[in-house]
Image (cartoon, grey):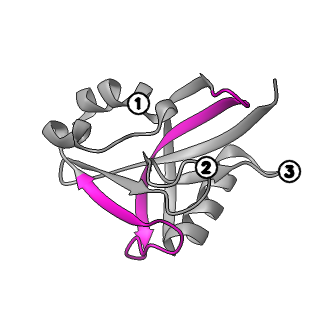
Amino acid sequence: MKTINVVAAIIIKNGKIFATQRGYGKFKDGWEFPGGKIEEGETPQEALEREIKEELDTVIEVEELVDTVEYDYPEFHLSMKCYLCNVIQGTLKLCEHKAAKWLGKEALNSVDWLPADIALIERLRRLL
């Protein structure tokens, strides 16, 4: 089975986590933590900085690794490194996503998370 290596940004502000809704592709309308694929020659941190700049027109600082989620979708295996991040510059403008929300602890289950992202929810609830 093919493995896809991706990174995801966990952006927390005022006790809430930033979540985005996909606007394209097979997983359209599903909610996720923003990020994307690691390109050849990039570190995970460099990939995450690039992806957030492309997707949200925002410069971030990548901090600590929160978790690495391993998830088997029917067509591929996903290995997702999830990092706490801080916004350095920008306003998290949606360039590719359909929608975004800031979710507090009590609202984390209010969106339809993509399967791989669900694995993080309980751990993140403890961070808030």
Q: Which region shows up in magenta?
A: 73-102
The residue at the far left in this view is 106
**Residue wearing tag 2:** 26
Tell me the residue at 30%/24% (across/down). 122
Disc on res. 118: 1
From this view, report whether residue 82 is shown above or below residue 27.
above
**Residue wearing tag 3:** 41
Q: Are marks 2 and 1 in contact (CB under 8 Å)?
A: no
Residue 77, percent from left and from top: 70, 27
Q: Are marks 1 and 3 in contact (CB under 8 Å)?
A: no
Spatial CA distance of label 2 from label 3 is 27 Å
Most foreground residue, 44 or 2 = 2
Tell me the residue at 37%/65% (across/down). 99
Residue type at the position of mark 1: Ile
Q: Secondary structure at mark 1?
A: helix
Residue 70, percent from left and from top: 60, 23
Label 3 neighbourhood size at 10 Å, few (<14), some (14-19), many (20+)?
few
**Mark 2 vs 1, N-terminal side:** 2
Label 2 neighbourhood size at 10 Å, few (<14), some (14-19), many (20+)?
few
**Mark 2 vs 3, N-terminal side:** 2
Q: Are marks 2 and 3 in contact (CB under 8 Å)?
A: no
Could you say which quadrant of the image residue 104 lies in?
A: top left
Give left or right: position of 53 versus 128: right
The residue at the far right in this view is 40
Label 1 neighbourhood size at 10 Å, few (<14), some (14-19), many (20+)?
some
